[in-house]
Image: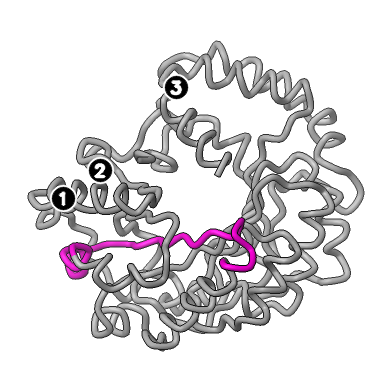
Amino acid sequence: MQYYKLLKLNGLIKNYRIKFLGLYIFHILKKRYLAVHFDPINACNLRCKMCYFTDADYVKKLKGIFNPDELDLFAKAILKRAIKLQIGCGTEPTLYKHIDKIIILASKYKVPYISLTTNANLLEKEKIEEWAKNGLEEITVSLHGVTEKTYQDMMTKGNFKRFFQSLTYIKEVKQKYPKLKLRVNYTFNEDNFEELKYFYDVFDAVDVNILQIRPISKIGNTEYNNFSLEKIIPKYEEIFQLLKTESQKRNVLFIAHSKESLLQRKSVVSVIKKYTYCYISPTTFFREDFNWKEEDFDTYAKRTKMGKEIGKSIFSSKKEINDLKNESLNYDIN
């Protein structure tokens, strides 16, 4: 859980100059600071109503599978500077047949935290056990409803009973591999928010380690398009405190916006995201000018004078910092 301690520390540091100074020191000392988010396949088995997979025009463009023969190049290019590898970001990684190889490579390059994000409708116990054996430390499951009715309405093509069975598999594997953690990411809107009051009534049995709740965000012309939080705000503090208290009782890490940050959204917390967030997919690899098949991150950073750029950011103006503010990581870790 060291990764979450670092996130919490980042949240506590409000001075952006200190953030960039710390990042600059990490960079010149060649320490790990990249959060690598890897979608090895541009596909999904569900059609969740809040997801861009319900945007027909977007899905037409979202194609491709990461060549398994190039996974070694991927690992060599980026993983030695990764503090975390998240397999699965905006698509469903369990549709990719080489997850085990990705995890083995991440372990080989000693990535401190290896996570997989999934809708959990295709998980099998044998695979989970294999991944845990090879070094997977966290499985994050996406959830859009506490009740079966809401779940299957919001997560079209999803099966609530199959989802719950997958969580049971994870719990069973955790007994053999206690380093493995189960994280639940609950995306809320005006139609599923109040169900969170009953979260532990339903999911206490599967031994959740981390619970994050986060508001709906616009990610395309999605089928569900009510982005208002008007009905949520008056009830937010009550449910936030309830979940926080119940999570603490169970030693569950609870991640959520405070009411203030929910309203404000953008903050200084993630101004360093420009340098620390690394997204990779079959069609994207970090930055367009990164020739990852022929150079690694250190070579690229030296060629593009990234260290000098980070150093200059220490002295950025408030206007420049305002342009870097975003919604990422703007939450409390309780």
Which element type, helix, strand or loop, lies under badge 3? loop
Tag 3–tag 1 contact (CB < 8 Å): no
Q: Residue 13 bears which disc, if any?
A: 3
Residue pointed to by mark 2: 262
Q: Is residue 247 left or right of residue 42?
A: left
Q: Residue at horizontal 75%, vertical 39%?
A: 81
Query: What residue occupies the far top of the structure in this picture?
Result: 315
Q: Earlier in the sequence, mark 2 or mark 1?
A: 1
- For the residue marked with disc 2, what is the amino acid? Leu
Q: Which of 313 and 158 lies nearest the eye of the viewer?
A: 158
Q: Residue at horizontal 37%, vertical 32%?
A: 267
Which quarter of the picture shows residue 103? Answer: bottom right
State the quadrant of the C terminus: top left
Which element type, helix, strand or loop, lies under badge 2? helix
Q: CA distance from mark 2 to mark 1?
A: 9 Å
**Residue 113 part of the magenta-drawn span:** no
Q: Badge 1: few (under 14), some or many (20 or more) residues near its Cα, within 10 Å? A: some
Which stretch is magenta? Answer: 175-197
Q: Residue 236 bears which disc, if any?
A: 1
- Image coordinates of residue 85 in percent, x first then y, are 66, 52
* Count of marks, rendered view: 3
